[in-house]
Image (spheres, rainbow, N blue to C red):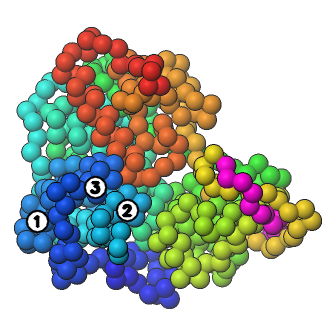
Amino acid sequence: MPKQSPKERRSNFQEVALGYSRQQAEEEASRCIQCKRPKCVQGCPVGVEIPAFIRALREQDMLEAVLALKRKNSLPGVCGRVCPQEVQCEKACVLGKRGAPVAIGRLERYVADWERAQERCIRCETLPPTGKKVAVVGSGPAGLTCAADLARMGHQVSIFEALHKAGGVLVYGIPEFRLPKSIVESEVDYVCSIGAELKLDAVVGRQVGVKELLQDGYDAVFLGIGAGAPRFLGVPGESLAGIYSANEYLTRVNLMKAYKFPEYDTPVRRGKKVVVVGGGNVAMDAARCALRLGADEVHVVYRRSREEMPARLEEVENAMEEGIVFDFLTNPTRFLGDERGMVKAMEVVEMELGEPDASGRRSPKAKKGSESVVDVDTVIIAVGTMPNPLIASLTPELKTTRSGTLVVDERYRTSMEGVWAGGDITSGGATVISAMGAGKAAARDIDEWLRRGKDSGSAWCDAGA
């Protein structure tokens, strides 16, 4: 796919990938062999009708291409940009056995962008009203997907969002250069256009509780509140000024537009020698933001090797092209501050890989006597997230795991009657598309439960918990 040159893009927040031209899209679509039993569909967590939308694109029936996408996916512009197709639908493509798979994600983006260029919203068919009301808490990918599907099923849906912008991690976590916020806004608008009501600045747990929602006329509740609380390393000096969690750093930059300061009055430290600790997509996002904010040098410090990095290959390659330095097999052991309490240096130790751990990656072990100290002026910790405990702490009926995630069964039912949950609040930090898959599965079960009568069976299945 065409994209900005590394030299050009490292100094702006405009989208890096530029998208296919019409000719490129049609040529790529022509590669699809239209399998009778498409494994690509099986590899998609939301079951997009992949052969159908590609066939329509190839036949230049763009209206049908849009509808074929939207029948299963209400956020195609988002998924076409940030979904890890290379390990899902494209990995299952039969052409990938002997060459390159069909670029399904890029074609999805092309179709979604074509629709946006028409300046009109193409809506899928909705069912007649059922008279049932559902509260969806959180407007991230899980919540938006659940809300859209329930609205199309004819239910009255209200989305409660704690922030002043809808989109969840799509707006506070993913940078503009990877996912323009105008894309998120248009897809939120689509979800609202098919019947969902959006309530911003609505903090469920403080302003209203889950119990109160069920008592105030809602027949069911879906919790898609994500996992927005940061994890830290737990090493000395981590509380020094100039050390951010990736959540705070990216929220300041993305949601609060710190990169447009002083047009937007949001301060963020613009370090000259920045270190990002972690190896996932969030670490890549933070490092590339720091570079665009004017850093002379940005290092990604990761305790394993490149082969074990969980970040998408595309994001790692983009970061390397832009000049970000990767310090593999390296781990911070403490941070050092100056007389003002600002971070000025970081002590690190070299690592070596041992046997695989529960994740399948080889466990890192410190090399004795390999400690060294490096100068830094800004540090961003990107080593994972955990759920905000607010709702669970105020709702004892909801069972949680030791890590704070909500316990659900295979139908995404929680331990509380009439309450479902999905996305990062149940899985911990995961991908956008996996959260969408959870939202879609929960919507199916909520619909079935509402239509057959709420008193026809318990919402909790111990066997699946």
Q: Residues within 10 Å of mark 2 (few under 14, many from 20)?
A: some
Residue mark closest to the camera, 3 vs 1: 3
Residue located beneath label 3 in the image: 39
The x and y percentages for residue 342 are 79, 63
Q: Which mark is residue 56?
A: 1
* Vertical arrangement, residue 159 with respect to residue 325, above or below: above
Q: Residues within 10 Å of mark 3 (few under 14, many from 20)?
A: some
- Dividing the picture into quadrants, the one containing residue 368 is bottom right
Can residue 208 be seen here? no
Q: What amino acid type is highlighted by mark number 2?
A: Lys
Residue mark closest to the camera, 2 vs 1: 2
Extreme residue toward the right, this view: 369
Could you tell me which residue is drawn at 29 percent across and 76 percent down? 19
Q: What amino acid type is highlighted by mark number 1?
A: Ala
Give the main secondary structure of the magenta stretch. Answer: strand
Give how far apart the Cα atoms at labels 2 and 3 are: 9 Å
Q: Which mark is residue 91?
A: 2
Could you tell me which residue is drawn at 77 percent across and 63 percent down? 352
Can residue 373 be seen here? yes
On the picture, is 159 further left or further right than 195? right
Extreme residue toward the top, this view: 455
Could you tell me which residue is drawn at 14 percent across and 59 percent down? 52
Would you say residue 44 sits in the magenta stretch? no
Secondary element at image label 1: helix
Secondary element at image label 2: helix
The magenta stretch is: 339-357
The x and y percentages for residue 392 are 53, 27
Give how far apart the Cα atoms at labels 3 and 1 are: 19 Å
Q: Along the polypeptide, which appears first: circle 3 or circle 1?
A: 3
